[in-house]
Image (cartoon, rainbow, N blue to C red):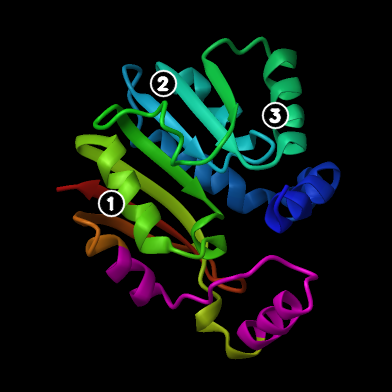
Amino acid sequence: MNQSEKFWDNMANKYDQEEKKDELTYIKIIEKIKKYLKLSDVVLDYGCGTGKISNEIAGSVKVIYANDISSKMLDIAKTKTDGRKIKNIEYAHSTIFDERYEKDSFDVILVFYVLHLIEDTPKVIQRINELLKPGGLFVSVTPCMGEKRFLRKLLYLLSKIGLVPIIRSFKIFELVDLIDNGNFIEVETECLNQSSKEYFVVSKKI
């Protein structure tokens, strides 16, 4: 088990409580996502956490493949899905580089609160492009800490002493440029929360 997996396993039981503090943002995210979904869509939820988003949008799509590096997060997600008798979500203790995911196989890939936690973001974006069907949508939400200088420095120090995972401090133009350079075209960008600089970005595979 690597350090990131251990951190998120330890966070699993408290994660939903933290999400509730930002409930209005999550409601907004779910409303915005649904506008882009079709009942025929095959969706990948990369880094699904405790399944909050997947469970809420399951009725709007054909099937969701949801993965996460934390087995404890997935256990909570599965419990929610079973409790709601949702049948079209398949969970995997895995990453986006899982070889079972085939090229050009997804209509939509969701990446929420993950891109700033990845060491090689361009590699992940390239993989997302590879897995999407032509014209498929890459939908992400990312806190852009680079917009807040003090917070960026604080998170860097906390990551150095191991209290939080490594966190990349994007500015929004840097994030959009990375995505565009991965053979995507921007469809929509919106700041969901001015205080935390969380950006909702929708891009289409070229």
Identify the residue position indicated by label 2 in the image.
Answer: 61
Task: Give the alpha-carbon distance from disc 2 to disc 1, as whole Å.
Answer: 19 Å
Which amino acid type corresponds to the residue marked 3 in the rendered image? Ala
Highlighted magenta segment, given as a residue range: 151-178
How far across and how far down the image is residue 154, in percent?
71, 84
Identify the residue position indicated by label 1 in the image.
Answer: 203
**Foreground residue among 127 and 33:** 127
* Residue 188 among those drawn in magenta: no
Q: Is residue 94 left or right of residue 49?
A: left
The answer to whether residue 32 of the structure is visible from this angle is no
Please report contact status of discs 3 and 1: CB closer than 8 Å, yes or no.
Answer: no
Total label count? 3
Under tag 1, what secondary structure? strand
How far across and how far down the image is residue 201, in percent?
38, 56
Residue at position x 60%, y 70% from top?
167
Which amino acid type corresponds to the residue marked 2 in the rendered image? Val
How far across and how far down the image is residue 202, in percent?
33, 51
Residue at position x 51%, y 46% from top?
29
Which amino acid type corresponds to the residue marked 1 in the rendered image? Ser
Mark 2 / mark 1, whichever is N-terminal: 2
Q: Say the numbered circle drawn on residue 144.
A: none
Q: Residues within 10 Å of mark 1 (few under 14, many from 20)?
A: many
Q: Residues within 10 Å of mark 3 (few under 14, many from 20)?
A: many
Task: Give the alpha-carbon distance from disc 3 to disc 1, as whole Å.
Answer: 27 Å
Examine the rendered structure and indicate whether residue 9 appears above or below residue 72: below
Identify the residue position indicated by label 3 in the image.
Answer: 77
Residue at position x 56%, y 76% from top?
145
